Amino acid sequence: MKLIIAITGSSGSIYAKVLMDRLVQLQSQWEKVGVVLSDNAVINWNLEIGEEDFSKYPFDFYKKNDFYAPFASGSAKYNTMIVCPCSMGTLSRIATGISNDLVTRAADVVLKERRRLILVTRDTPLSLIHINNMKAVTESGGIICPASPSFYSRPTTVAEIAGTVVDRVLDLAGFQQQVYRWGEMDDQ
């Protein structure tokens, strides 16, 4: 699988970090991972995570305006794109087809090629504009996966709480993983 990870400026950098950490663990299931961060994503990552050492990840990182990135074209055959977290501004641009940076261009390509687009939205409350944009993306074939954690598995750390969302995202993306499954755990 060839995968695109876009990290945008919504609060919730922990989701992106846990996602990338999990992908390292699932390395045998992907061929390439391309990552692009918006300017605000970098600001929020530094604010929320406190470190910016992306070199530890075995992924290809691209600048937000690098339209020469392979996934800026459908011919590169990237199967899935995950925008995590997805800001409402990014959602809006994707929903209306505005491809003004690599994140929105890649999402546009994924949708036009009828591939998998997963937006991990992280904002509350939602306005009718947000809801209509989510509807437009869904009608275009995208998947809206709000960063709404579950607590069945009794997570005890922030990373474990974020992991409940990331596990769902990875399931939606088609990864095989050993995670908590409702009704499959005896003494939970």
Image (cartoon, rainbow, N blue to C red):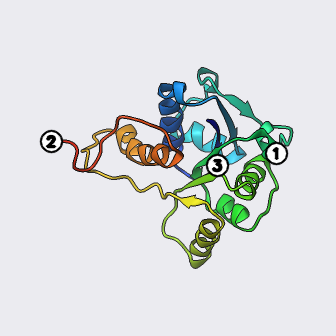
Between residues 4 and 90, which one lies in front from this camera angle? 4
Which residue corresponds to mark 1?
73
Query: Looking at the image, do the residues carrying marks 2 and 3 touch, with CB atoms under 8 Å apart?
Result: no
Closer to viewer: mark 2 or mark 3:
2
- Residue 11 pos. (x, y %): 54, 51
Q: CA distance from mark 2 to mark 3?
A: 38 Å
- Residue 169 pos. (x, y %): 48, 47
Element carrying mark 2: loop
Given the current orientation, which residue lies at the most extreme left position?
Answer: 187
Which residue corresponds to mark 2?
186
Closer to viewer: mark 1 or mark 3:
1
Q: Residue at x 61, y 60 (%)?
A: 142
What type is the residue that disc 2 sits on?
Asp
Left or right position of 178 against 33? left
Q: Residues within 10 Å of mark 1 (few under 14, many from 20)?
A: some
Report the disc number at residue 8. Answer: 3
Report the disc number at residue 164. Answer: none
Q: Residue at x 27, y 40 (%)?
A: 156
Left or right position of 111 against 17? right
Q: CA distance from mark 2 to mark 1?
A: 47 Å
In the rendered view, tell whether residue 9 sits above or below residue 124: above
Q: Residues within 10 Å of mark 2 (few under 14, many from 20)?
A: few
Q: Earlier in the sequence, mark 1 or mark 3?
A: 3
What type is the residue that disc 1 sits on?
Ser
Q: Earlier in the sequence, mark 2 or mark 1?
A: 1
Q: Residues within 10 Å of mark 3 (few under 14, many from 20)?
A: many
Image quarter hosting the N terminus: top right
In the rendered view, tell whether residue 100 sits above or below residue 81: below
Between residues 125 and 27, which one lies in front from this camera angle? 27
